[in-house]
Image: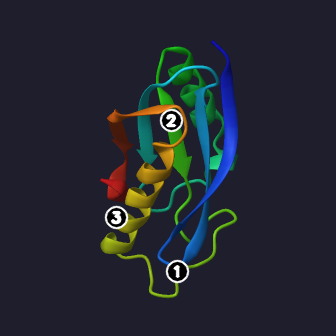
Amino acid sequence: MGVVERELTFEARGLTLHGRIVMSEDKIQPGVLFVSGANPTPYKESEEFNEFRRHLCEQGLNSFIYDWSGMGENEVDPAGETLLARQEISEAALKLMKHYHTDSSRIGLVVTSMGG
């Protein structure tokens, strides 16, 4: 099984947001959406975390991680970073993930801190 990493953009709250999916290149498999908490490291700078996500894919789990508004390459949400804003962004990320070799009936969450 080949592992593919792809940079993706998605829309939420009128913003274009950036993330990275790690997925099987040739089969549909369950997935994990990573939702970070307050003051996280942008996903592109977290190589140890990204290596863990590659390992998950090799074990049969696709994964998607993204940055909140105002992080990494993302614009700042003029309405602010509220819990409702984070929920809407997470829902948009989950919807996107379902289009990339991920079994939409088997997606779990890994959350940290305020991401939960």
Q: Are marks 2 and 3 in contact (CB under 8 Å)?
A: no
68 with respect to 37 (left or right): right
Please tell me whether mark 2 sits on a helix, a strand or a loop.
Answer: strand
Q: Which residue is mark 3?
A: 87
Image quarter of residue 16: bottom right
Cα distance in 3D space between marks 2 and 3: 18 Å
Cα distance in 3D space between marks 2 and 1: 25 Å
Mark closest to the chain's N terminus, 2 or 3:
2
Residue at image x 63%, y 12%? 1
Mark closest to the chain's N terminus, 2 or 1:
2
Q: Is residue 33 above or below residue 90?
A: above
Nearer-the-camera pick, 38 or 62: 62
Please tell me whether mark 3 sits on a helix, a strand or a loop.
Answer: helix
The residue furthest bottom is 78
Cα distance in 3D space between marks 1 and 3: 13 Å
90 with respect to 63 (left or right): left
Q: Position of residue 62 (x, y in %)?
A: 50, 30
Q: Position of residue 44 (x, y in %)?
A: 68, 48
